[in-house]
Image: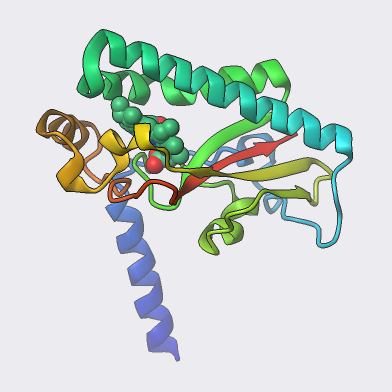
Amino acid sequence: MKRMHHLKSAFGLLLFAATGCTGTKTEPVSDQTPTSEPPPSIVAGAMPSEESKAAMLAAKDALFTRLSGRLMEAMADAGPAGAIGVCSQEAVKIANEVGAEHAVQIGRTGVRLRNPNNQAPPWAAALVEQKVDTPVFAVLSDDSAAALLPIKLQAQCLMCHGPEEQIVPEVQQKLAQLYPDDRATGFNEGELRGWFWIKE
Ligand code: HEC
């Protein structure tokens, strides 16, 4: 038993090292939580108000619209390989801006991650692991409302997230350069790509 435990923690360490985090691992939700307290978790059987649900959906729509708009603009300006640079510099910034405007915390995570910093907050981790592919609304132990909303892969995402043989060499090179641990290729159209997570 003890041996198993040791093996397990060694594996955990390896996994951590493999994410390529250079000690700046970000935990999106915990920055507002004192470190002495455990992060908030889902309260079983509780549902947020319709108002909260609508507010979280509105934040998601705003982030989706702004990200898609910026992506299309960058593709027109710089082509898909250039757009990757824009994505990598702006995606998280845009999420933070939309979050501030809508007074929520919001971000994206994936079934498999391109940017290891896009990890789900602790309350959503189990749902992500189960690859839940329908919207989930929840109340957390800190009384906040939260939502995890699936993102399906569309045709226009394939050039950067599709099967590797469908990704042009310039894009592959740029991805390898910016995301040496990229795991977010090999998705097919209609497949679950990831989630927006929102916490009020
Ligand atoms: C021009 C290339 C490009 C296109 C097209 C593209 N993405 Fe991405 N995607 C990226 C990059 C680069 C990142 C990493 C951003 C970062 O560093 O936060 C990313 C990250 C993500 C993430 C966050 C999780 C992760 O793996 O880090 C999701 C979810 C996602 N993309 C979904 C989509 C969907 C859905 C589409 C189509 C509507 C799409 N992407 C189109 C390049 C692209």
Q: Residue furthest left?
A: 169
Question: Dividing the picture into quarters, in which one does residue 48 lie?
Answer: top right
- Residue toward you, 45 or 180: 45
Tell me if I can see residue 65 in this picture.
yes
Give the answer, above or below, for where 116 lies relative to 141. Answer: above
Q: Position of residue 74 (x, y in %)?
A: 33, 13
Query: In screen coordinates, is 33 left or right of 171?
Result: right
Q: Position of residue 23 (x, y in %)?
A: 37, 41
Tell me if I can see residue 24 in this picture.
no
Q: Residue furthest bottom?
A: 1
Q: Quadrant of ligand 1?
A: top left
How many tags in the picture? 0
Question: Dividing the picture into quarters, in which one does residue 125 lie?
Answer: bottom right
Give the answer, above or below, for where 89 lies relative to 196. Answer: above
User: Which residue sits at x=67%, y=48%?
Assistant: 135
| The C terminus, quarter of image | top right
| The N terminus, quarter of image | bottom left
Query: In screen coordinates, is 49 left or right of 43?
Result: right
Q: Position of residue 12 (x, y in %)?
A: 38, 65
- Residue toward you, 113 or 12: 113
Give the answer, above or below, for where 92 lies relative to 38. Answer: above
Question: Dividing the picture into quarters, in which one does residue 22 lie?
Answer: top left
Q: Position of residue 191 (x, y in %)?
A: 43, 51
User: Which residue sits at x=39%, y=19%?
Assistant: 71
Query: In screen coordinates, is 44 left or right of 41?
Result: right
User: Which residue sits at x=73%, y=22%?
Assistant: 103
